Image (cartoon, coloured by chain):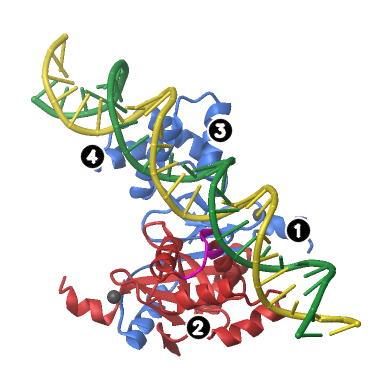
Chain colours: A red, B blue, C green, D yellow
Amino acid sequence: MTTQAGDQLAPDDLAGTLDAAGYRMTDARRAVVGLIASRDGTFDTADLVADARRRRVPAARATIFRTLEILAAVGAVERLDLPNGEHSYVRCDTRGHHHHLVCTDCQRSVDLEELGMTTITADVELRTGYVIDRHRLELFGLCPNCQTRLPS
Amino acid sequence: MTTQAGDQLAPDDLAGTLDAAGYRMTDARRAVVGLIASRDGTFDTADLVADARRRRVPAARATIFRTLEILAAVGAVERLDLPNGEHSYVRCDTRGHHHHLVCTDCQRSVDLEELGMTTITADVELRTGYVIDRHRLELFGLCPNCQTRLPS
DNA sequence: GCGGCTGTCGAGACTGAGTCTCAGTTACCT
DNA sequence: AGGTAACTGAGACTCAGTCTCGACAGCCGC
Ligand SMILES: [Zn+2]
Ligand SMILES: [Zn+2]
Ligand SMILES: [Zn+2]
Ligand SMILES: [Zn+2]
């Protein structure tokens, strides 16, 4: 099952999640959540800082960093690394372990739930003797929209 | 088929590879290749800079960065991102597309040749309509050695 | 509803990885 | 050997990300 990026990042839910984890729901955090919710695809901290200024949202640079850290910790957002090596974030529209497929042109992202990686990791464990407890998988390509825009 | 990290990073081969790609084989590059060859597991630029100074190898900081960039371009080394978000490098003992399995304790790394990802990407393409042309997959866990050292 | 304890915020200083500049050097081709 | 473009070292520079600290504001208990 896949979810299109663009869904809301529910701030109410989030309040509960943060609370459970011992965080407070403050104006600044609501503001950052709002900025993220109205973003499409991957974004980086500079994007958010710019958005915040443009929309005159009260959220200082340091606060944006701090909030992203928290959101990543509770799984509302994920930090990923673009093919070019840059760090960026994606909103996660899925709970639990999943991966992201990102358009290399427009940055639009799709969440992908588990993909049969357990078979692969089990196989690798057998072959190498390692015990695997974590993996990072990111897929990149062109979204349907960008395929038609760029006949390449 | 897997290759243990620790094999030599052949500087002679490399000379050919670099040449073919229009690069020169210089002392500084040989030096950096040497530093990398004597490394075990993942390392970052700070590690190499420290190694260089310790071993009095003539390789300025900027040169180390530049050389790593080139080595990554020709596939002798790969830039990867640890679970904690830090950038680091691994020597590649395998030619062509492959992935890395890294020990989260001692950083020792194993190259993994293709793992049946084509099945997965084909499936995802069908489900999403994206055209996937690249992916990043990194596996993390404990190597056999560290499993016994840390009964955990 | 009203303190008070604490977590959080903003502003700006600070850090350090990575980049850039530029003058001097060197590999490679002929 | 000579010419030339690629490369190098040293250090300045950038800018993402962190830290500090005094002011502020959630949330809890009364
Ligand atoms: Zn696109
Ligand atoms: Zn997975
Ligand atoms: Zn290990
Ligand atoms: Zn692969």
| Residue beneath disc 4 | B22
Q: Quadrant of residue B136?
A: bottom left
Q: Is residue A112 on the magenta stretch?
A: no
Nearer to us of marks 1 and 3 is 3
- Position of B132 with respect to A14 (left or right) is left
| Residue beneath disc 3 | B51
The type of residue carrying mark 2 is Leu
Ligand 1 closer than 8 Å to label 2 CB? no
Residue A131, position as x, y percentages in the image: 65, 66
Give me the residue at 43% from left, 74% from top: B116
Decide which of B107, B112 is in the foreground and name it: B107
Nearer to us of marks 4 and 3 is 3
Q: Earlier in the sequence, mark 4 or mark 1?
A: 4
SS category of the residue bearing label 1: helix
Nearer to us of marks 3 and 2 is 2
Chain name for mark 4: B
- Position of A102 with respect to C15 (left or right) is left
Q: What is the CA distance from the residue labelled 1 to the residue labelled 2?
A: 43 Å
The magenta stretch spans which residues? A57-64
| Residue beneath disc 2 | A9
**Residue A135 visible in the displayed image:** yes
For the residue carrying disc 2, how many other residues have a C-alpha within 10 Å: few (<14), some (14-19), or many (20+)? some
Nearer to us of marks 4 and 2 is 2
| The furthest residue to the bottom | A1
